[in-house]
Image (spheres, rainbow, N blue to C red):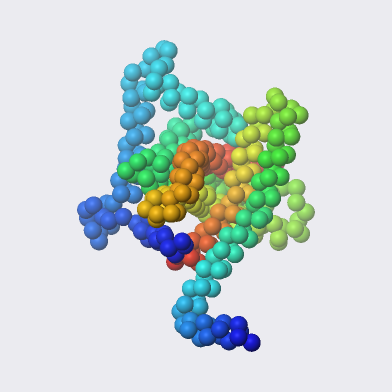
Amino acid sequence: MAIPAVLAQVAEGISGEDQISYGEAISAGFAYGLAAIGPGIGIGYLVGQSVQAMARQPEAAGMVRTTMFLGIAFTEALALIGFVVFVLLKFA
Amino acid sequence: MNLLALEFPSIDRIVTFKPLFGEDTPFEFNKVTLITVLAAVLTFILFAVAGSRSALVPRGVQNLVEASVEFVREGIVMQTMGSSGLGWMPYLTALFWFIFFCNITEVIPVLQMPASARMAIPLSLALLSWIIFIVVGIKHQGPIGYFKSALFPPGVPKALYILVTPIEFISTFLVRPFSLAVRLFANMLAGHILLVTFAVLSAALFVKGPLAVIMPLPAIMLVFLTGFEVLVALLQAYIFTILTAVYIGGAMHPEH
């Protein structure tokens, strides 16, 4: 029973403003972490498939590379919006 | 933020600068403004120098500029717009160099701040691209034809237009300029924060006594990240330019 009492004491010492800033810090970390999952899988799959296409048809490598960068740009945008949310939560 | 008793600077300290002159006026001039002006002037000087001493066998600056022009021509314009888009070559080449100079100041000592890590530069460039592709679309297909082909893509069952048209409107006219600006801005800001974090870490561990043993780790990482950020600066300039070209090309030739 000693440990919960200690925790309660700590929690009593936290003011409302502190709690909000703790919440912001934690949710900022979660925002970026969650936003990176989808684009991570997406870019990995995209580049893997592009490499396979280039290996199968080396003469089409230029065209595949251009399209690959376009796809990366669109996929990456999601992760970057997550990063912006992180910055807004953490610093704004 | 307080990790290992190290003081990490807040975001305000690493992206805002003291005004050099013109405080509290719309013409306030600080380091970011200086870098922007520098980037524009450098782009101008680069092409002036390369063009003034044009030799049949290019050397030095002329070689670099000709290589970049050919890269924009073959790698960006011909791939996305075809030969009818060659008129946009000068704009796209200048755009590429300007964004590259705005980005590369991230790793240049003394300056060490990408001008594109403040929203103003990416946003104005993205709005410029947005206006250009709408105007090009209206010019090439007529005002009704352009919005008809943009909002009512052919080959979709009539009933689905209730769903497709709002999505197309949002993705073409609202999300495009937003994502174009945010992509450049967030990439450069993230790189800047990364470099600052590792620089602070290696500088602080140097004076922290026993912790100096692990000091080489962030210092080595800082060197690698500096090289990586040069790559990112180039890549982001390329991506911004090619997306602008894709949008203009899409407005020129509607899909059938």
Residue at figure coordinates x 33%, y 27% from the top left: B48
Judged from this view, the residue extending furthest toward the top is: B56
Residue at figure coordinates x 70%, y 24% from the top left: A59
Image location (x, y in percent) of residue A47: 68, 40
Image location (x, y in percent) of residue A54: 71, 31
Image location (x, y in percent) of residue B128: 45, 47
Quadrant containing the C terminus of chain B is top right
Residue B204 appears anywhere in the view: no
Image position of B30 with respect to B1: above or below: above
Image location (x, y in percent) of residue B247: 57, 43
Q: Nearer the viewer, residue B178 or A13?
A: A13
Residue at figure coordinates x 45%, y 54% from the top left: B211
Q: Nearer the viewer, residue B150 or B170?
A: B170
Residue B214 appears anywhere in the view: yes
Q: Quadrant of residue A57?
A: top right
Judged from this view, the residue extending furthest toward the front is: B210
